[in-house]
Amino acid sequence: MTTTKEQITASSPPFSAFVSSAPEQRNNAPVVLTPPSPDAVKDAAAAASWVRENRTEIDAALSDAGAVLFRGFPFASIDDFDTFVRGFDGWNDLSYDRSMSFAVRKRCSERICTTNEGKSGGLVFHHEQAQTPLWWPSKVFFCCLVPSKPGDGGATGLASSADVYQKLKARHPEFIRKCEEEGVRYTVYAGPMQDTSKGAGRSWKSFFHSETKEECEAKMRAGGWDWEWGVGPDGSDMSDEFLKCTTPVLDAVKIAPGTDKKCFFNQLIATTANALEFSKVGVDGGGFDPSTDVPTQEGVDACVQFADGTSIPLDILLDAKKMCEDIAIDVQWQKGDVALVCNYLMMHARRPWVGEAGTRQVVASLIEEPDCTSFGKPLTAL
């Protein structure tokens, strides 16, 4: 990494930072910020103060590039990360307990959780929780406490959803028209217990924050969901403790708040992995690799359709997946790195990792989106 002379102006030293270059950058994204000297920001509390003094510039960098990488700051623990995140005044926490993520996670502190306890989670580019009808995050922080060993993988990929939108519009204009005009509905398949063998293995009890089927149904009814019990993704009979549920109509394209950029904001690409995982609901593991295996069109139809009930072509989703890979930026984690990602402007994906348990630790903090809407209408809280 080399440091340039371009400097973010702050009210007074030592709370300033250099805009640096790093191997993972492409077209100046992510913006990489480093302290001007090793002694400039000595601990997490000082880093939080630095954020407050440089907030305007940091927000502008995030809006422009979609991601900011803080490198060289003194973050060595979950408490350090928590302190740093709290320096972003006005950004409210979206706790895992309150979120509607498919992923299985563990809470580490009031504002920090693990990224994904599922063995195959995160391998396909996605927007955090964009498939849920409420409480998706506006921004996501990631912090690397333990980087993976050389050769083990485990980088985090970033892909510009604004660029993907433009590429899809040029290549598949009718598809984008339907995304914008029709919207989409996702179907979720979940058992009563967490399934950590899958990236999308959260139980319906955890997903809907309900202990009983009656409580779960009341929340789905209020939120405009459709549901059935005991039905698998291929129409197969399951135990009546297994849930099939379908969201209300959701946007598939959004304008990133505070910008004029249209974004491919959805979970359609990730559905190519979810379709494989949901097809194995109730089965530990499943013997597939969502980074390479391809679902059938019928498998995709069972997980997502346009709002009018028509299929979303698998070949277009696979083309979109390739577009993400073609423009991807891979953050090669260093100890103490923090990446701040705009959940609208950037999709993210955990790259394959083959290390032993405990040899890579990346944790996250989600920032609440205060205005969750679909086609301009507020979505109902569950």
Image (cartoon, grey):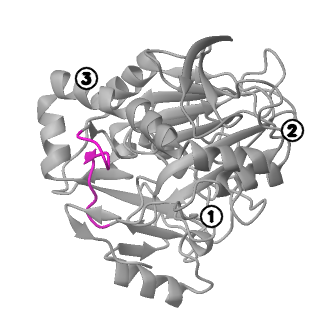
**Residue at the (56%, 64%) spot, across then down:** 94
Mark drawn on residue 266: none
Circles 3 and 1 in contact, beta carbons < 8 Å: no
Q: Along the horizontal axis of the image, is 107 left or right of 306? A: right
Location of residue 145 in the rendering, given as x and y in whole percent from the top left corner:
81, 39
Whether residue 256 is in magenta: the answer is yes
**Residue at the (43%, 29%) spot, across then down:** 65
Helix, strand or loop for disc 1:
loop
Location of residue 276 in the rendering, given as x and y in whole percent from the top left corner:
51, 42
What's under tag 2, amino acid-wise?
Ala
**In front: 244, or 170?**
170
Residue for badge 2? 357
Residue for badge 3? 167
**Residue at the (74%, 55%) spot, across then down:** 83
Q: Which residues are magenta?
A: 248-260
* Prevalent SS, magenta region: loop
The quarter holding residue 96 reads bottom right
**In front: 45, or 122?**
45
Residue for badge 1? 96
What's under tag 1, amino acid-wise?
Tyr
Quarter holding the N terminus is top right
10 Å crowding of disc 3: few (<14), some (14-19), many (20+): some
10 Å crowding of disc 2: few (<14), some (14-19), many (20+): few
Is residue 164 visible to the viewer in this orientation of the structure?
yes
Helix, strand or loop for disc 3:
helix
| First-in-chain label (2 vs 1) | 1
| First-in-chain label (3 vs 1) | 1
Label 2 or label 1, whichever lies nearer to me, is 1
Whether residue 237 is in magenta: the answer is no
Helix, strand or loop for disc 2:
loop
